[in-house]
Image: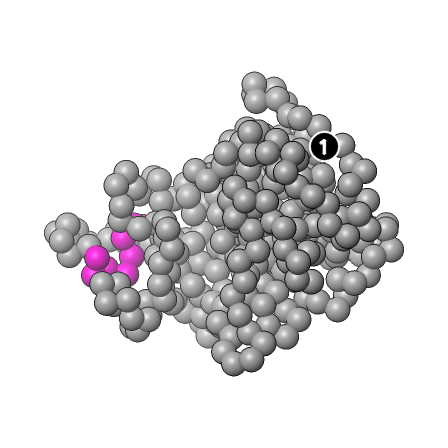
Amino acid sequence: YINTGKKEGGYLGYGFVKFRFTGRIGGKEYAIFQDKNIGGITESTNQCDLRNELHLLAWGQYFLDSLIFTPSGGSTRSHVFNLTCWSSYHIKWNADDAFLGCLVEPLAEVPAHERSKQSLLYSTFLATPLLPFPVGPGGMEQKISGNSEVGENTDHVGIWVDAYTHHTLVDSEGEYLFVDIQGIYSDKRLVLFDPQAHTYDYSSGFWDKGPPAIAAFLKEHKCNKVCRQLGLHREIVPQKPVDGSTTSADAMHEKKGTVRSGKYLTLKELVD
């Protein structure tokens, strides 16, 4: 199915780095992700890439909650600035019930020329709830920003997500900038997936271009009307050191139990 490009037999497709297949746990369908079998990718590399993506799914939802909704009912930036337009849309990251899994039994050895016929190439995999790609009027996959390109959207959803991107940098005090944002939009519901970020210490994954990319965003980003309504245009984002010294990001990671723990974590463990 990979060679023919057909979405059959559980095969869903591939991106620049990963393959995607259908899986099922109990009665729930999941999308199963692994790195592609390309030069330099090993079991360890695959595990690291997928762990980083799971962490970003959790952080992405954390920043979204701090902007528009908190499960505990606490204050969010939207509440503080009395901006309630979010209530007409349902926006979330595809993070609920996502997890990093590992095969109980090792994969059987196969010849190199047969590897393209395997569903799983490595022992570790990322599972996220399977998103039904909507069909018919009103449903679409929407690319909102790129890894290096600053979002300058003019549609309603894009404007809000551009403001969310700015918020991630402000709320993290200059330590996280979410980029390459995309999602499935249908009937006023937007589900975001496949996150990337730039960080002050290049820690989020191979896609992370660090402080230079954050500085470029601060220089090129033009606050839209939602940024201004949220007071983001008045915020000064501090520049962070890259010398290994302790910063608030380390405290955030210790509190959340994320990337620096080096453990296999579920989303619940990540956010508890």
Disc 1 marks a residue whose amino acid type is Val
Query: Looking at the image, is 124 positioned above or below residue 256?
Result: below
Question: Would you identify the image quadrant in which residue 189 lies?
Answer: bottom right
Q: Nearer the viewer, residue 83 or 258?
A: 83
On the image, the x and y values in percent for residue 211 come to 57, 29
Residue at point 47%, 67% (across, down): 130
Residue furthest to the bottom = 136
**Can I make out residue 2 in this image?**
yes
Q: How many numbered markers are drawn?
A: 1
Residue at point 54%, 44% (across, down): 149
Residue at point 65%, 34% (across, down): 219
**Can I make out residue 260 in this image?**
no
| Magenta stretch: includes residue 129 | no
Q: Nearer the viewer, residue 156 or 246?
A: 156
Query: Quick check: 118 left or right of 176?
Result: left
- Mark 1 — residue? 237
Question: Would you identify the image quadrant in which residue 22 lies?
Answer: bottom left
Circle 1 Cα neighbour tier, 10 Å, few/some/many (<14 / 14–19 / ≥20): some
Q: How is the image coloured?
A: one colour
Q: Quadrant of the N terminus?
A: bottom left
On the image, the x and y values in percent for residue 42 come to 29, 41
- Overall secondary structure of the magenta stretch? loop
Residue at point 55%, 37% (across, down): 198
On the image, the x and y values in percent for residue 53 come to 48, 47
Query: Quick check: 219 left or right of 51?
Result: right
Query: Quick check: 114 left or right of 170?
Result: left
Report the span colored magenta.
116-123
Callout 1 secondary element: loop
Query: Quick check: 69 left or right of 19?
Result: right
On the image, the x and y values in percent for residue 111 come to 12, 52
